[in-house]
Image (cartoon, rainbow, N blue to C red):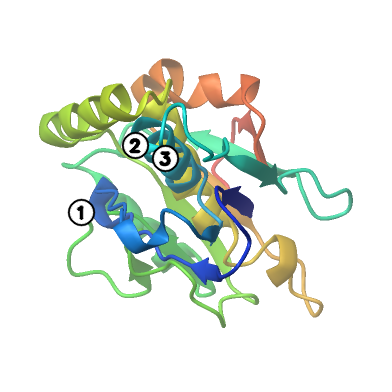
Amino acid sequence: MQRWCAGGPPKVALAISLSAAFGTFIIFLVPSLLNRHVTVLTTEKLVADAVVGGTNRYRHRGGQSTVTFRLALDHLPGIYPIKIPSFIDRRARKGGVTALAQEITASNANAIVISDMVRGVDCVMNFQNMKGVNGLEPNDIYTVVTCLSPAKYAELNVMGRWLDIPNIIQKYYQDQINQAVGRNCGFRQSPDRETKTVLITSRRLWKSVLSELLNMASRIQLYEIGGKPW
């Protein structure tokens, strides 16, 4: 969770919800809030970065507005960070992810697959629909991340340049993985059975993006495994 505070006399505390659906970040810059104390609570790092970037871009320079204060709650001993095994599978791409999801769910009746672009397979959720979902604590979660489309890649890079967010692609994936892992780990760890939580990706995406997450502070620590985890 990220806690962020900014600017002005602390007369009113307001909670602002920032939509990160499909990578589009909406910042509500309401003039009436400029002299207010604003608090934003979010579990997504990139949303927090967008809030800070947008505030820095539009804050009153030379006035009384203060810089943003940010409290990152990513290191909580006993809860975070969480070590997650990562399996490399060449089917973790648009043309093969449906067959991969079918194999996983057929092999494990307790499996829930989280991935985009899967069609016609039961027990599968996409990254948007799984956010905030409860009730998956006793399930085994298999998260399949695939390469971004060129349009999405370009959109995120433009947003990163505009809001001065470095490594925006890595942070985008980091948030997706954090949210998926959180369905049965951390505060949602099952007290009744030992569950599986696994990341699956292609060698290309692992080498170009996900391996770099090992050097970034995060609630999740990835490590590569060899055998199929289902």
3 vs 1, front mark:
3
Q: Is residue 137 left or right of residue 119?
A: right
Q: CA distance from mark 3 to mark 1?
A: 34 Å
Quarter holding the C terminus is bottom right
Nearest the eye: 89 or 135: 135
> Which corner quadrant of the image does residue 57 belong to?
top left
Number of numbered discs: 3
Residue type (three-letter) at the residue carrying disc 1: Met
Give the crowd class for mark 1: few <14, some 14-19, many >=20 residues within 10 Å.
few
Q: Which mark is residue 117?
A: 1
Extreme residue toward the front, this view: 63
Nearest the eye: 70 or 135: 70
Residue on which disc 3 sits: 55
Residue located at (23% from left, 58% from top): 118
Residue type (three-letter) at the residue carrying disc 3: Thr
Helix, strand or loop at mark 3: helix
> Which corner quadrant of the image does residue 193 belong to?
bottom right
Up/down of 179 relative to 55, above or below:
below
Residue located at (49% from left, 76% from top): 133
